[in-house]
Image: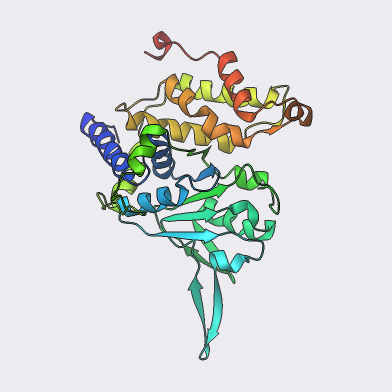
Amino acid sequence: MALTSEHTQWFETTFGKLADNVERAVVGKRHVVELAFTAMIAEGHLLLEDVPGTGKTSLARAMAETVRGTSTRIQFTPDLLPGDVTGVTVYDQGRFEFHHGPVFANVVLADEVNRASPKTQSALLEVMEERQVTVDGVTREVGAPFMVIATQNPVEQAGTYSLPEAQLDRFLMRTSLGYPDHAATLRILEPGRPTRVVVPAIAELEAITAMSALTHDVQQHPLISDYIARIVGATRTATQVRLGASMRGALALARASRTWALAHGRHYVVPDDVKALAEVVLAHRLILDPEAEFDGVTQGAVIGQVLLDTAPPSQKDLA
């Protein structure tokens, strides 16, 4: 289906209203809110690396409330079991009955996901990739839209288990909220502001589904695809990198760029869309060489250098 100007305008307007609404609860974090909705519309998941008290739970709850969806919160701890995440089958009065786990929601907050054992973390692998849960040989869909917002504390590492590469690769983006600036702090401290801000529903779940469908029709010039491929390829040959971005990462960057383009009123992708999202989409997929880590090299710095070294297609070539 060819995108019309009406489609593009509706998408941009709706996207802006969704972000405005969530900003009532998550003050002063417009860019992160836009990234979160980009991940949701692109049918991806979000990893937030942040210290406690920055509004991660508020973000997940406000996003679900905005689209009249359901949200759940799973506190990951060392004693959490896979069945506590996916659900279990119990025997009740002569028959087996499935009790749904907290992953059966539109927005699932996996709080401090790296505190659970690898066995429990793996309970998220199927549902994040396939949007379904298989328990005792029976597969159940979790519905749409579906998004996992996982958090981990980048400072405190005692008693934690590093997320395996296979799970990190399933997150469309990794970013952080961070502390609010001075102006936002003053707004949060205003007398009478409730501790928990409940935002009104301004859209239905069907709106997110419709927005997701529109992103498939965004024009992506072959040279843009080539640009994405060259960026991903450069992460694999960078001297500081032991393992570069996967093909899943390339697909994620393309999908997120198409969503970002529509959110900014365009029915086609430009190189700036790719540049704006490259770090949040690709950085967490890289495994650095131990010597580079020891020297203080970060994954974000590697992506930044790759963008500097990889020439984007010119406007003339894209015309």
**In the image, residue 58 lies at what x, y percent?**
41, 50
**In the image, residue 167 lies at what x, y percent?**
62, 48
Q: Residue furthest left?
A: 6
**In the image, residue 204 lies at what x, y percent?**
27, 52
Q: Residue at x 64, y 55 (%)?
A: 115
Task: Judge left or right: residue 253 versus residue 200.
Answer: right
Q: Nearer the viewer, residue 140 or 29?
A: 29
On the question of residue 205 being in view, the answer is no
- In which quadrant of the rendered image does the C terminus lie? top left
Q: Residue furthest front?
A: 191
Quarter of the image holding residue 43? top left
Q: Residue at x 58, y 21 (%)?
A: 304
Quarter of the image holding residue 22? top left
Q: Residue at x 70, y 50 (%)?
A: 158
Q: How is the image coloured?
A: rainbow
Q: Nearer the viewer, residue 51 or 11?
A: 51
Q: Against 72, is 8 above or below?
A: above
On the question of residue 157 being in view, the answer is yes
**In the image, residue 132 lies at what x, y percent?**
50, 59
Q: Nearer the viewer, residue 128 or 48?
A: 48
Q: Against 134, is 262 above or below?
A: above
Q: Residue furthest bottom?
A: 93
- In which quadrant of the rendered image does the N terminus lie? top left
Task: Judge left or right: residue 237 versus residue 170.
Answer: right
Q: Residue furthest top?
A: 316
Number of marks: 0
